[in-house]
Amino acid sequence: MCQIMGIFRCGAGKQNVLRERKRVVHHCAAVKSRCLRHLLCITFVMGIIPHADSSGTNSEHNCRVENEKFRCNNRNLRQFPLLPSTSARSITELALSNNCINHTLNGYFVGFDNLKILFLQHNELTCIENGTFLGASNLTILDMSFNRLFAIQVDAFKNLSKLTNLHLEKNLLEYLPDGIFSTMENVKHLRLQSNRLHDRSLPMGLLKNLIFLVSIDMSRNRLTTIPSDFFKGLGNLVKVNLRDNMLTAVNMQHWPSVTHVILKYNPLINITNVPNDTRLRADYTYILCTCENEKALNLIMGDTVHSHCPNFRNDSFTCPADSSNSPSHDRIARSSGLISSCWSPTLCLSTVILTCTIKLCHILGLL
């Protein structure tokens, strides 16, 4: 079983209410809108899960089924509202966002035979267990962003073979088990940004069954490397977002179909084997002026170039015919928006860019 570890515990006992309320009020100074929801949730006293009447109306929370859509957003719910089985079978969209739900989801979706869209963002979910979505095998869109998810068990999504959009961004995920996406071959858009994923979080075959994947967002995590064959075999993959990580090298050897790559705000040194016709965004990164980076350098240089790289001619980088592909640390290219520059390593120590390149200088052995 997964433990509950949310900062705001919507089911706190009465003796804890005042203490929790003080914590909420303090937090509200920074995040007023989100805290108001938590404050209401903490002070909300709820006996049992209310039942719905025959019309599908939940009288206590004013939630209603209309046009096969059940919407119960912003109702301070701590648990899922119950629906008549006749209503559950007809629902195609279930919206329960902006609540305080932190209970296990297991068993709730049995009977939701026609459910296609499920919104659970902005709740207090911490763990998704195996078999959670049994009964909801027709889901195509699942949004669990902005929760407190720290664990997802390997078979949690096992029966979601029709899913096309999966949102897991803005959570606390540090690890994704191998095989978690094994039965989700129809997923086209995968959102994993703003978690705590690191190199050991990503098993080598994590994405191998997502053969129809079009875009993946892994920005704002803690990645330092991406294996060159991590996206191997994903022939439909077009867009990869890896901005705001800690990447120092990217090898795109097995990214043949990718046309949009975002690498902004990474301490990069090498970007190699860039596919033809790739649009590369590498603003505010540092790249060695070497032959192996020739294609990447020409892609990021833009229309306006201030260059100190020895082989730049007419706003492009040309690798000398007799030059070796071995890495050279004598020049560094810095991309900054539409203006790119090449700096000698001594400029790493200048006060102008010291804060931006202090880590890079350590890597290059300059400090």
Image (spheres, rainbow, N blue to C red):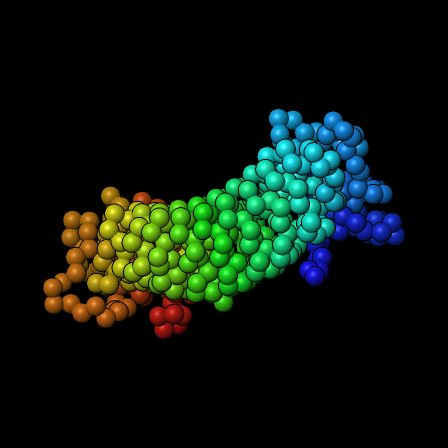
The answer to whether residue 343 of the structure is visible from this angle is no
Task: Tell me residue 76's x, y (percent).
Answer: 74, 39
Residue pictured at 65% horizontal, 26% vertical: 66
Residue pictured at 63% horizontal, 54% vertical: 131
In the displayed structure image, the side of residue 251 where residue 43 appears, left or right: right
**Residue most toward the right?**
15
Residue pictured at 45% horizontal, 47% vertical: 186
**Residue most toward the left?**
321
Figure quadrant of the C terminus: bottom left
Residue pictured at 64% horizontal, 40% vertical: 112
In the displayed structure image, the side of residue 149 where residue 251 appears, left or right: left
Residue toward you, 349 or 198: 198
Figure quadrant of the N terminus: bottom right
Task: Tell me residue 332's x, y (percent).
Answer: 29, 61
The answer to which image quadrant residue 330 occupies is: bottom left
Q: Is residue 350 above or below residue 282?
A: below
Residue toward you, 349 or 126: 126
The answer to whether residue 270 of the structure is visible from this angle is yes
Residue toward you, 95 or 315: 95
Residue toward you, 202 or 108: 108
Task: Tell me residue 343's x, y (percent).
Answer: 29, 59
In the displayed structure image, the side of residue 79 where residue 13 appears, left or right: right
Query: In this figure, what is the number of numbered marks?
Result: 0
In the displayed structure image, the side of residue 57 where residue 135 appears, left or right: left
Task: Tell me residue 53's x, y (percent).
Answer: 78, 30
